[in-house]
Image (cartoon, coloured by chain):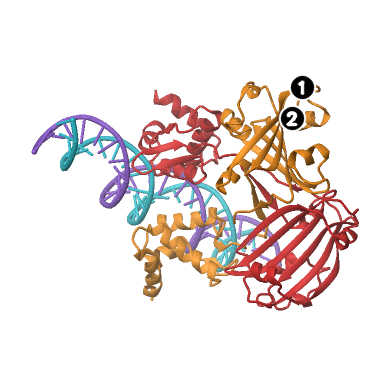
Chain colours: A red, B orange, C cyan, D purple
DNA sequence: TGTCTATACTTGTATATGGAACCATAAACT
DNA sequence: AGTTTATGGTTCCATATACAAGTATAGACA
């Protein structure tokens, strides 16, 4: 009677090229997805898998271990393995580089540099960078365009200690983002998104009417414990939208 | 002379409770993070690790294999293992359940049900659900409040084929989101975020002035190939902000 | 009845061993 | 010179084996 089960495993493994441990993984993963194994249901122990499928315990172990790290099942030392509850529906939104996004749509990306100069940190920037009062920073303002239409005001502050040559770059050839990521390794970053009304200058730069709402992204990037850059990106609501790829 | 290297591994392993393969992982992970091993640099082969650290090849294998699945290194069959290039900076934004978010801030979450009835799909909804023209749907509108202040209008459409009892629920006890995720397993979802100006009704429901910009999230959730629900969530820009936890 | 103990079963780790598949390079051959 | 063939190194997979450590349960004991 172990024959039937072994056969269904064989289905997964018959197409050669699939490792045995993958076949075992897929076997249980399918049972979970189809609902045949419901949340909290018990998964056969490693030794039971050995007996039923005729594989070694180490390959059973690898199959279950990887299912666990993928969040499909939960393993409890000394007790057993159980189907994990599906994650509470939270969706991940990928905030991407504007230039890449535009190019991927096969549109033309151009940038206009409005400002590129040193400056001093005000109270807010001190807080963001975690730097002492009046610290020196670099400041740039650029307008990104998609097929000629302004789509983002990039208002960026840069830590000169980490990127001393920032002001000398030609950002029409290489976006600030690209330069910075090549210059220093990014270890962490965070983002905030909100809806705001732009001021007069911003309206003019984005070529939009006075009361058009905008998406404002604030993104901080870190190298170790140091903030590399803080960028405020302002997008006109009519021409831009954040999208989750998938998942 | 292998002694020195073995000693530095011993540092990681000396604190008992750390498995050997973890110690090996940490050893190389630290070298990568510190910059001692730069991108594309070669990592010792499994056999070299065996010789240098005196561990078995399988534990060296597990260490490197896990580093690879974590994206720290890249392994090439028949060639060797190499330090991976750090990911281009794209950040993930987690879009969460509004009620959970509020409760996590230790604030009071209340909801007011404005509408709960069957309806027919218009052209847009047909498209979203992938249903035939004039299909039946359920429609609900609720206003979520944080400590009494309106913070979200949840405008939701539900596929009756998957959730036939939607209209009979008491959504003051359990949010629609919670009910749906308990009812049917969510296999996929996507989100879009944009900035918009609310209309008069929405302003009144959110208790905000006419020209306050709002964040509008559209979220579709799937069960297999079927759309379970489409929800439009409208947040006042002054009281809400999307935030990335970390990563 | 309540408490301790032995036992069996579980996952977790570590080793030794073997073969397959893949790649680069050197050597042999045309 | 150009092509083919060995060869040594690499990752990858699978097995057999052993012990450690956690958990639950049955049974002995007070």
Q: Position of residue C10 (x, y in %)?
A: 35, 39
Q: How far is mark 2 from mark 1, CA to CA?
A: 10 Å
Say which chain tag 2 marks: B
Q: Is residue A53 left or right of residue B81?
A: left
Neighbor class of circle 2 (other Cα within 10 Å; few <14, some 14-19, many 20+) is: many
In the image, is residue B136 above or below residue C16?
above
Q: Name the residue at 49% across, 46% down.
A: A69
Residue where numbered disc 2 is placed = B129
Provide the secondary structure element on which disc 2 rests: helix
Q: Quadrant of the N terminus of chain B?
A: bottom left
Q: Position of residue A200 (x, y in %)?
A: 88, 61
Q: Position of residue A108 (x, y in %)?
A: 87, 56
Q: Is there any visible trace of residue B57 in the rendered image? A: no
Neighbor class of circle 1 (other Cα within 10 Å; few <14, some 14-19, many 20+) is: some
Provide the secondary structure element on which disc 1 rests: loop
Q: Name the residue at 57% across, 49% down.
A: B105
Residue where numbered disc 1 is placed = B135
Residue A82, numbered circle: none
Q: Name the residue at 77% across, 47% down.
A: B214
Q: Nearer the viewer, residue B88 or A18?
A: B88
- Which label's residue is closer to the chain start, 2 or 1? 2
Residue A118: image quadrant is bottom right
Q: Position of residue B213 (x, y in %)?
A: 79, 49
Q: Quadrant of the C terminus of chain B?
A: bottom right
Q: Nearer the viewer, residue A49 or A10?
A: A49
Q: Are marks 2 and 1 on the same chain?
A: yes
Residue A186: image quadrant is bottom right
In the image, is residue A241 above or below residue A117?
above
Whether residues under marks 2 and 1 lie with C-beta atoms below 8 angstroms apart, the answer is yes
């Amino acid at each position: 009677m172990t024959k039937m089960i072994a056969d269904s495993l064989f289905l997964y493994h018959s197409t050669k090229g699939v490792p045995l441990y993958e076949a075992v993984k897929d076997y249980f993963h399918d049972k979970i997805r189809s609902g045949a194994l419901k949340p909290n249901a018990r998964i056969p122990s490693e030794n039971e898998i050995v007996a039923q499928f005729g594989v070694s315990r180490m390959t059973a172990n690898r199959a279950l271990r990887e299912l666990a790290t993928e969040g499909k099942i939960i393993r409890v030392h000394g007790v057993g393995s159980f189907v994990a509850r599906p994650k509470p529906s939270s969706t991940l939104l990928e905030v991407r580089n504007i230039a890449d996004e535009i190019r991927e749509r096969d549109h033309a990306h151009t940038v206009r540099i409005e400002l590129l100069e040193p400056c001093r940190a005000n109270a807010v920037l001190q807080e963001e960078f975690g730097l002492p009062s009046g610290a020196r920073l670099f400041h740039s303002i650029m307008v990104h365009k998609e097929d000629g239409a302004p789509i983002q005001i990039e208002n960026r502050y840069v830590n000169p200690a980490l990127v001393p040559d920032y002001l000398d770059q030609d950002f029409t050839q290489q976006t600030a983002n690209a330069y910075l990521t090549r210059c220093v390794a990014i270890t962490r970053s965070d983002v905030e998104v909100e809806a705001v009304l732009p001021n007069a200058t911003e309206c003019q730069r984005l070529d939009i009417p006075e009361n058009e709402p905008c998406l404002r992204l604030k993104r901080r990037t870190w190298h170790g414990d140091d903030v590399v850059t803080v960028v405020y990106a302002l997008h006109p609501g009519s021409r831009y939208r954040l999208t989750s790829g998938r998942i």
